Amino acid sequence: MDRRVAIVGYAQSYHQQDMQMTREDMVFEVAKGALRNAGISREDVGTVITASTDFLDARTISNLYTSMAVGAYLKDESKVEEDGAFAAYYALMRVLSGVHDIALVEAHTQGSVVNPHLISSYTLDPLFERQYGFLNDISAAALQARMYMNKYDVSEEQVARVAVKNLVNAADNPNAHRKMPDVSIEEVLSSKLYYDPIRELTMSPISDGACAIVLACEEKAKEITDNPVWIEGVGSCQDTYIRDRSLYKLDSLQKAAQDAYEMAGVSDPFAQIDVFEVSEKFAHEELMIYEALGLCREGKGKALVEKGMTGKDGEIPVNPSGGALGADPICATGLVRIIEAAKQIRGEANGYQIPAYRALAHGQFGICAQKNIVFILGGE
């Protein structure tokens, strides 16, 4: 990238099951918080990008109602109908273009408003899958999990280890929704079964939450902060429709990661990246993510978690914040991963800090992680 861009401020809500405030108030608080964290005012911002969906907001042209709350009045403003990490990508391109120097990115979902698992069925083929009513994001994930587990001889206990790791990690994160410091593998395996093998504690909770970040070009970033977090690389890729792709691997994530690595000059992610924040909507997905990111060979993700290599004290810490299993405010989840990765680099992850100079943040959207995006972030 000819023009360097950095994260200079961020804020996120205390993600929870049923936030007792309006969506507008939630958005206002994180937008104000991110600007305050950066030490700038609304007047300094050139463009505002938000991330939400009309379906999950349960109203059309939903950004119309939050534009004032996010500070977009009389600003260049746009909306991304998916995960907030893609909104960050859009804002990055606007700053790289030279048209804007500072961008505010905000993402939110109040999962308590509309059941997101019901909404997921509307992304399916309207003439076949949707008519039969068998598939949604959970049942599709169950098919994916079983295909992956059967192909690589992965046990339910090995999947449960991912859930235990992340739920215990979430207990140290003040912003997390689901915190279970004493959870055991047995407790995970005895939790409510939705679609075999998906259980309540191996899938992300329905969360209310929001977050925001401030991006700035190099000149402005150095004026704003002594501790910028540079965006060194980014890659994005969307896979084909669910019935037209191999569900036992994440091809689009692998391609997105390769592009991000190439841009950032990363040839060995295992050795060159200090911490990983990934969006694992289901516990089995994290094992697949390890493989797609090049941390191990196909089918060997189970070995990383069994050996404790992805724990907070492991060689390649993954989701010290608790990840999506700790909180999943759907459209904000990927942007939260960017914030959590940036906090690690800036040394601000109090209670779950990993010594980190370079971090990877991952966002996803769509059934069975159809669309993926990867950011490589680095410090000074």
Image (cartoon, helix red, strand yellow):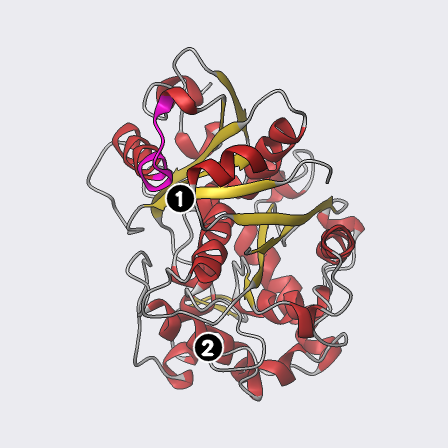
- Residue 251 magenta-highlighted: no
Name the quarter where the N terminus is drawn.
top right
In the foreground, 1 or 87: 1
At label 1, which amino acid type do we have? Tyr
Q: Determine the residue located farthest toward the bottom in the rendered image.
A: 307
Q: Secondary structure at mark 2?
A: loop
Residue at 75% in and 70% down = 268
**Between marks 1 and 2 in the image, the one whose residue lies nearer the viewer:** 1
Q: Determine the residue located farthest toward the top in the rendered image.
A: 74
Q: Is residue 295 above or below residue 314?
A: above
- Residue pointed to by mark 2: 312
Left or right of 155 in this view: 194: left
Q: Is residue 134 visible?
A: no
Q: Quadrant of residue 28?
A: top left
Residue at 69% in and 34% down = 127
Q: Is residue 86 above or below residue 140?
A: above
Q: Is residue 220 visible?
A: yes
Callout 2 environment at 10 Å: few (<14), some (14 to 19), or many (20+)? Answer: many
